[in-house]
């Protein structure tokens, strides 16, 4: 059974196939789907979230039961804000399939990087690359591609600021 996970950033029109075991994205709203070569398949979908700041929020675990459509597509997660942390998605067979000996499991990790208030990335930096395809053109046999998003260069300080000594009052001798 072949599986492919695809991710889309809110406002984007392109679905990006996830071609690595762990994908890094910037903190934002995304949705995730899975595609398989099996149609009308009952799937147990699990979503586990481990936030970066464990003090501010708790871990989240969700389990859903869904069925692939006539194109083998299944919704893993609708548009959701990816807080900074580790997001893990896994799909596995339902209990009945497991009892019949037809066990399988696929998983995907997405690391959501926190926003840095002092260093904002330009809007052009997104996960959409030249290898991104519209959903209609996606096939499970996609070629691997490399993607690198480099941080913007910081401008060096123009000159050292000069400090003036405070003017002390003149005292008579």
Image: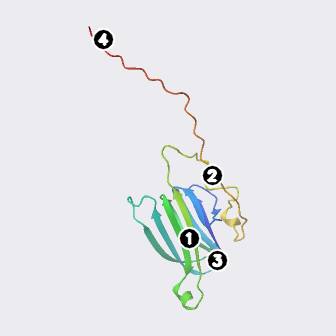
The mark that comes first in sequence, 3 or 4, is: 3
Q: In the rendering, which numbered label is found on residue 122?
A: none
Query: Which dot, 1 or 4, sits closer to the camera?
Result: 4
Query: Which dot, 3 or 4, sits closer to the camera?
Result: 4
Query: Which dot, 2 or 3, sits closer to the camera?
Result: 2
Q: Helix or strand or loop: what does disc 1 sit on?
A: strand
Query: Which dot, 3 or 1, sits closer to the camera?
Result: 1
- x and y percentages locating residue 61 in the rendered image: 45, 71
Q: Residues within 10 Å of mark 2 (few under 14, many from 20)?
A: few
Q: Residue at x 71, y 60 (%)?
A: 145
- x and y percentages locating residue 80 in the rendered image: 49, 62
Q: Which residue is mark 3?
A: 70
Q: Residues within 10 Å of mark 3 (few under 14, many from 20)?
A: few
Depth order, front residue of 72/4: 4
The mark that comes first in sequence, 3 or 1, is: 3
Q: In the rendering, which numbered label is found on residue 75?
A: 1
Figure quadrant of the C terminus: top left
Q: Name the side, left or right, on which 52 lies relative to 32.
A: left
- x and y percentages locating residue 162 in the rendered image: 47, 23
Q: Quarter of the image holding residue 51? A: bottom left
The reply to whether residue 9 is in sight is: no
Q: Which residue is mark 2?
A: 149
Figure quadrant of the N terminus: bottom right
Depth order, front residue of 146/173: 173
Evaluate if marks 3 and 1 touch, with contact meaning CB atoms under 8 Å apart.
no
- x and y percentages locating residue 139 in the rendered image: 70, 69
Q: Name the side, left or right, on which 141 lies relative to 67.
A: right
Q: Which residue is mark 4?
A: 170
For the residues labelled 2 and 1, the Cα–Cα distance comes to 27 Å
Q: Helix or strand or loop: what does disc 3 sit on?
A: loop
The mark that comes first in sequence, 1 or 4, is: 1
């Amino acid at each position: 059974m072949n599986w492919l996970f695809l991710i889309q950033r809110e406002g984007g029109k392109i679905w990006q196939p996830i071609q690595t075991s762990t994908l890094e994205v910037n903190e934002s709203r995304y949705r995730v789907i899975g595609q398989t070569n099996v149609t009308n398949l009952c799937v147990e979908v699990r979503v586990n979230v481990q936030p970066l700041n464990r003090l501010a929020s708790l871990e989240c675990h969700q389990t859903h039961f869904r069925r692939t459509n006539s194109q083998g597509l299944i919704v893993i997660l609708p548009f959701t804000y990816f807080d900074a942390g580790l997001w893990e998605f896994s799909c596995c067979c339902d209990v009945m399939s497991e009892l019949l000996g037809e066990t399988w499991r696929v998983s995907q990790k997405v690391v959501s990087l926190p926003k840095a208030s002092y260093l904002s990335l330009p809007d052009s930096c997104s996960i959409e690359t030249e290898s991104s395809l519209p959903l209609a053109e996606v096939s499970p046999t996609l070629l691997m591609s490399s993607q690198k998003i480099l941080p913007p260069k910081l401008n060096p300080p123009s000159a050292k600021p000069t400090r003036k000594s405070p003017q002390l009052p003149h005292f008579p001798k």
